[in-house]
Amino acid sequence: MAALAGWLGGRLGLERWRTLPVSRRRQILAPILLGTGLLFPFVTSNAGNVDAAANAFTYVLLALGLNIVVGFAGLL
């Protein structure tokens, strides 16, 4: 039942999502991802998942930092 509801909701919302401008999509998606990331450790009961998410977040921050440094150096 949940899979059907998810499929139907995704099907109906996808057309509307595609018609939105990219800037509006980012305004909607950024708070959702941030909220999900902040709530994840409190919702899950598996410490391994929290550890994996923390490691992934660390690598994301490292990649962003490297991108900024290389961009400022003019190597891109």
Image (cartoon, grey):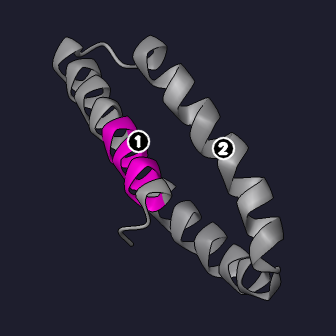
- 63 or 70: nearer the viewer: 70
Q: Which residues are magenta?
A: 61-71
Where is residue 49? Give x, y as percent: 23, 25
Q: Look at the numbered disc 2 and give the secondary structure of its residue.
A: helix
Residue shown at the point (23%, 28%) measured from the top left:
55
Q: Farthest residue in the front direction? A: 73
- 4 or 20: nearer the viewer: 20
**Residue 51 position by quadrant:** top left
Q: Which residue is mark 2?
A: 32
Quadrant for the C terminus in the image: bottom left
In the rendered image of this protein, does residue 25 appear above or below residue 49?
Answer: below
Badge 2 amino acid = Ile
In the rendered image of this protein, does residue 1 appear above or below residue 20?
Answer: above
- 24 or 36: nearer the viewer: 24
- Camera-side mark, 2 or 1: 1
Where is residue 19? Give x, y as percent: 80, 87
